Amino acid sequence: MPVCEELQRTRPEDVGHPRATATVSTCDADADDAVPVEPWQVHKLRSDEVYLTGWHRTGPDAFRILARRPQEHPLYRVRSEFDPLLLCETVRQTFPLLCHAAYEVPPGHQLTWGRFRYDLDDAAFAGVDRGSELELAVLCSELSYRRGHLAGLSLRAEVSWGGVRVAVAETRFTVQSRAVYQRLRGGYADAEAAMASAGPAPAPVPCAGTGRTRPRDVVLAPAAGGVRRLRVDPGHPVYFDHPVDHVPGALLLEAVHQSAGRAVRTLECTFHRFVEFDAPCTIVTAPLDPEPGRARRDDDGSPAVERTRITAVQGGQTRFTADLVHRVAPAREGSVRAAR
């Protein structure tokens, strides 16, 4: 059973915004007609962490969503590249937005992540106007309902930057009412109590190789046996915008990218069980290639890649699995000769 709730405990009354009451049905609307996005609709308290700026419907279950790319950010790399984690967060915000605004899911319902995948087009970035905003063409499918309310859907988003398609993301998530979710979580349902059980965050691994420059942003810690432990700091202002009752999926995606230590081209992950705050979680990395560590090039001469599986294990159970393809720096010619 996929059970990874995605930052959805915020209610309109928590942040001072009115409840969404209408579904926009205008097709082929211009960007100027896009409906503005409120922080509560994407389950955020801080407006500066809201990346979606407007949306409108283009078909019965199709949408055009506009998003901004911050010029500066304390966590995401935005100066010289498009941080894959910023892509993940931008796409993640479409889930609650469309649930609340387009499918009339009541505030307080919980979104549970089941699976998520993205594919980045490396070559497309070369010709992008990096000052442009993002545009997401979203198609929802496999909708299911329970007692008149949305119970789950699949979503595909084609992400364009400056008019150039740079990524495609796909996901599946389900929706539970507050009462059902509280029964599901039992003693873990209290978010404040759950976060308090995390205890002090352990010292991080060195920043080098994680893609982050500040120790506070590193979500990996050393562990016995040559593996790494998930490092959870509930006081982090970006990873924890508001109280949640378990480790959020966004933090697990961050751990995957930091474990890879390089640019991730393709990621496909499954959320099997919640990762809780009150017990250590081990991050295990294993190669999927038959000859791990040997950089290879595709037949067309594109950059060398390796395939890796990263797993989060807690209490002897697999909680999260991610298979990824990441770029590998090509070996220098001299090094190749020396190795022969």
Image (tube, rainbow, N blue to C red):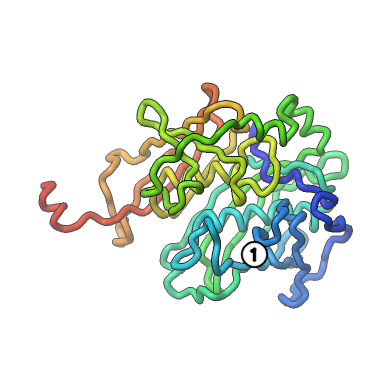
Q: Which of the pair 39/266 is nearer the observer?
A: 39
Taking the image as shown, residue 8 lies to the left or right of residue 218, namely: right
* Residue 105 visible at all: no
**Residue positioned most to the top:** 316
Taking the image as shown, residue 334 lies to the left or right of residue 142, namely: left
Q: Which quadrant of the figure contains the N terminus?
A: top right
What residue is drawn where x is 63% and y is 46%?
Answer: 240
Image position, residue 9 (x, y; %): 75, 43
Taking the image as shown, residue 245 lies to the left or right of residue 106, namely: left
Count of numbered badges drawn on the protein: 1
What residue is drawn where x is 76% and y is 67%?
Answer: 36
Taking the image as shown, residue 329 lies to the left or right of residue 125, namely: left
**Dot 1: what SS?**
strand
Above or below 87: residue 278: above
Q: Which of the pair 291/199 is nearer the observer?
A: 199
What residue is drawn where x is 27% and y is 40%?
Answer: 291
Residue 20, picture quadrant:
bottom right
Image position, residue 215 (x, y; %): 46, 47
* Residue 291 visible at all: yes
Residue labelled with disc 1:
137
Image position, residue 71 (x, y; %): 55, 69
Above or below 11: residue 5: above
Q: Amino acid at mark 1?
A: Ala
Image position, residue 67 (x, y; %): 64, 66
What residue is drawn where x is 73% and y is 25%?
Answer: 187
Question: Mark 1 packing: few (<14 Cα in 10 Å), some, or many (20+)?
Answer: some
